[in-house]
Amino acid sequence: MKILNEKDIAYAAELLKQDELVAIPTETVYGLGANSFSEKAVKKVFEVKGRASDNPLIIHVLGREELGKYCREIPEMAYRVAERFWPGPVTMVLKKKSVIPDFVSAGLDTVAIRCPVTRITRQLMAAVPFPICAPSANLSGRPSTTRVAHVLEDLEGKILAVLDGGDCTVGLESTIIDLSTETPVLLRPGGVTLEELRELLGEILVDKALTQPLGEHETPKAPGMKYRHYAPKAPVCVVRGKTDATAAYIAERVDRESGVLCFEEYKNLFSADAQVRTMGSRKDAAQQANCLFDRLRSFDQTEVRKIYAQCPLDDGIGHAVVNRLTKAAGFHIIDV
Ligand code: TXA
Ligand code: MG
């Protein structure tokens, strides 16, 4: 895989035009970019990731002027969200126009649309005559990629190029809000918080799939939220409660075969032969978001058989961190 920079935009654009895939940095995570209008390219996206075919893709646009090109019956709320948060880490689900192919939206009547911040990616978007669709640039089921090194880890030999935008600043995928229904519904928490969206829009429902495992016959509104996700190889156990108590609980249980994901403040509490990774201060949710996927990935380079994680505070962007971490754990949570 070639690692490209700003000098190589024309080459990256050429690859996309030829139905090749290019990994692209965004402020949230790296994406696996393709021409949204090319069935051949979009098929490759699904193949390369090993992604289920019923899981639709997000399309990326340069600004709110483009909403009308791809969406219909756009509610006023959508313009408010775009005005306030775009470019930025929030994706809107809106009714799609027929220009958006079914192979992008997995046959749904809606499309997920987002406007990323990262400059090099915006340069590439401006250099091609189609919207770039991009799921997170990881193999399905694995933690998303937030560093070029992660993209190489998962996709080396499978795609031709990655644009190097450095480390992603947010570190978790975008917030997804469904505005195609009467009352907006939060489908995935992310960098733009539920509190901020409620302040702007008023009532917002929260999809049930975010807080509990679904029953066998239930489906979340974001099809992707039903799959095992973000998971390192070893099983993860999230320990929830006051941070002193969760640290003590974990410290009593760790051994040579354990991984520990803890807050900076507690890193010296654990046995020296455990694999200890920190995710920033317990007070710094933005830092936790930024390094969560990197730390989860790092356990795959070890022989640990079980990973204990301290649970962050569940508000603001912490809500998204807790969501990803509990999904990585398959909702295996211990309250102490
Ligand atoms: O931050 C992000 O959103 C990153 C960057 C690369 O833009 N992309 C990303 O894509 O996270 P992906 O494919 O990993 O996650 C997209 C989620 C999936 O859960 C999918 O099911 C959901 O969005 N989704 C896509 N289109 C949808 C639609 N029309 N209705 C409901 N959910 C949708
Ligand atoms: Mg993903």
Image (cartoon, rainbow, N blue to C red):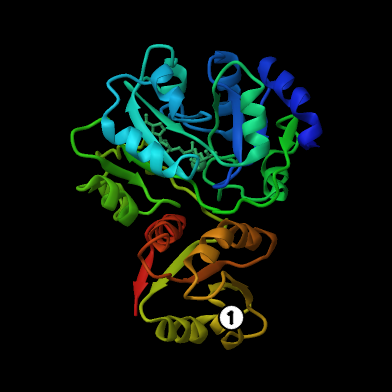
Q: Is residue 33 above or below residue 128?
A: below
In the image, residue 30 lies at what x, y percent? 61, 42
The C terminus lies in quadrant: bottom left
Q: Is residue 72 above or below residue 267?
A: above
In the image, residue 308 lies at what x, y percent? 50, 71
Question: Considering depth in this image, is 141 or 181 the residue closer to the camera?
Answer: 181
In the image, 220: left or right of 170? left
- How many callouts does the rendering have? 1
In the image, residue 141 lies at what x, y percent? 52, 45
Residue at point 55%, 65% (across, down):
287
In the image, 74: left or right of 87? left
Q: Is residue 268 above or below residue 318?
A: below
Residue 1 seen from this side = no
Q: Is residue 202 above or below residue 1?
A: below
Q: Residue furthest top?
A: 98
Residue 292 seen from this side = yes
Question: Considering depth in this image, is 10 or 16 the residue closer to the camera?
Answer: 10
Near mark 1 (Cα within 10 A), the count class, few <14, some 14-19 or many ≥20, is some
In the image, 276: left or right of 153? left
Q: Which residue is mark 1?
A: 255
Q: Amino acid at mark 1?
A: Asp
- Please identify the quarter of the rendering in which residue 237 is found: bottom left
In the image, residue 203 lies at what x, y percent? 19, 47
- Please identify the quarter of the rendering in which residue 234 is found: bottom right
Query: Under tag 1, what secondary structure?
Result: loop
